[in-house]
Amino acid sequence: MEATYYIGLMSGTSLDGVDVVLVDLRTTPPLLLGTHFCPYNNDLREALLSLHQSDYDELHRAAMLSNQLSYLFAEATTGLLESAGVFPEQIIAIGCHGQTIRHCPEPDKGYTIQLVNAALLAELTRITVVTDLRSRDIAAGGQGAPLVPAFHEAVFKKSDCHRVIVNIGGIANITNLDPHHFVTGFDCGPGNVLMDAWCLQHIGKIYDKNGLWAATGQVVPALLDALLADPFFAHKPPKSTGRDLFNLHWLEQKMRGSESPENVQATLLQVTVMSISRSIHTYCLGAEEIYICGGGGHNSFLMSQLTEVMQGKKVALTDRLGITIDWVEAFAFAWLAQQAILRKAGNLTGVTGAKGGRILGAIYPA
């Protein structure tokens, strides 16, 4: 059979599971042909979280988790192919982001780690795998993230409208699609990562559905100011971040200790809202339309608060643009796999700050 399709695999900072999509990239716009989701169980989630800090035997644990994740990625791929009625021979490549456990692009460190055993994944699926998509950009002096703006440009940019795409995953990032300028983008701060962690710690749920718990609280002004005073928010792009910065330890250092849990949750939601809105007002002047993707788009309270502070600008979900919010990132990594296979640059210097366009990813043939 002639290979025509790509698969995108995305497992993000939220640690909820793996999103996988089947796409046809021959058309304009590209077509989303199928989707599948495999959740992480609690043991896997906790094991991954434990690797964000140095501890005993972490090299062995990381290697074993890479194998475990690769089996799960293969299971997700098989489930997708079966539901779509497509054979492995019809897939050109899988673009696999892997599971980030460290992201340290600073010049004195210059590395990023996403767990996946790509050789094992290629062996299990009998499909070529493209992975390690961030390292080359970092080697070229870039942040290695966010990588989705290049895809946003390819599928969402219009010549007659200034759009902004906001991905609210564990971390929130912005793509500025100004028709009169080069595309820019950056991580603007925490998306769901702090809200999810606080929610799990205090009410035993992995996320705050629709923001209902946050809506019962009141924003604590002193805590909000302390959180937004972190130097990351004032730092000019290009910039990227992750759990290395935004975690419960970071939060607890800035608390007085007397705040009620629901008020902290309300404040964390406001941090996400304010960091997004301030970034758009500062770096996306003249934006007319704002489109949200990622899990944060399901948080109706977050969406209402963001719409309110955006002062009458059109705020909608990327569903309006043809790709539902849950699948945009996985779609982007299928597209990045194609860029690698075609030997085309996958990064944008105006986003990551790299010295130039680079072909991203390591290729593991089927």
Image: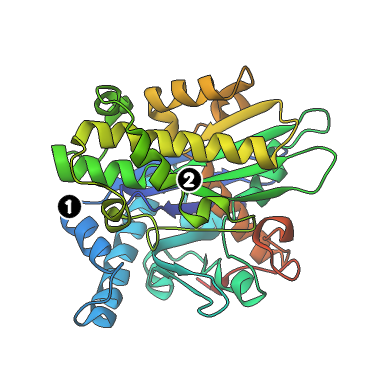
Residue 323 in sight: no
Q: Residue at x 31, y 31 (%)?
A: 266
Residue most extreme to the top: 312
Which residue, given by chain and number where applicable, does mark 2 sit on?
A: 21
Determine which quarter of the picture holds residue 120. Answer: bottom left
Q: Horizontal and vertical percent for residue 236? A: 64, 55
Residue at 43% over, 48% down: 20
Dot 2: element: strand
Q: Residue at x 16, y 57 (%)?
A: 43
Real-space CA distance between mark 2 and mark 1, rounded to the nearest whole angstrom: 24 Å
Q: Is residue 45 left or right of residue 350?
A: left
Disc 1 residue crowd, few under 14, some 14–19, many 20+, Cα 10 Å:
few
**Residue toward you, 101 or 64:** 101
The one nearer the camera, 244 or 41, is: 244
Q: Residue at x 47, y 39 (%)?
A: 34
Q: Which residue is mark 1?
A: 42
Q: Amino acid at mark 2?
A: Val
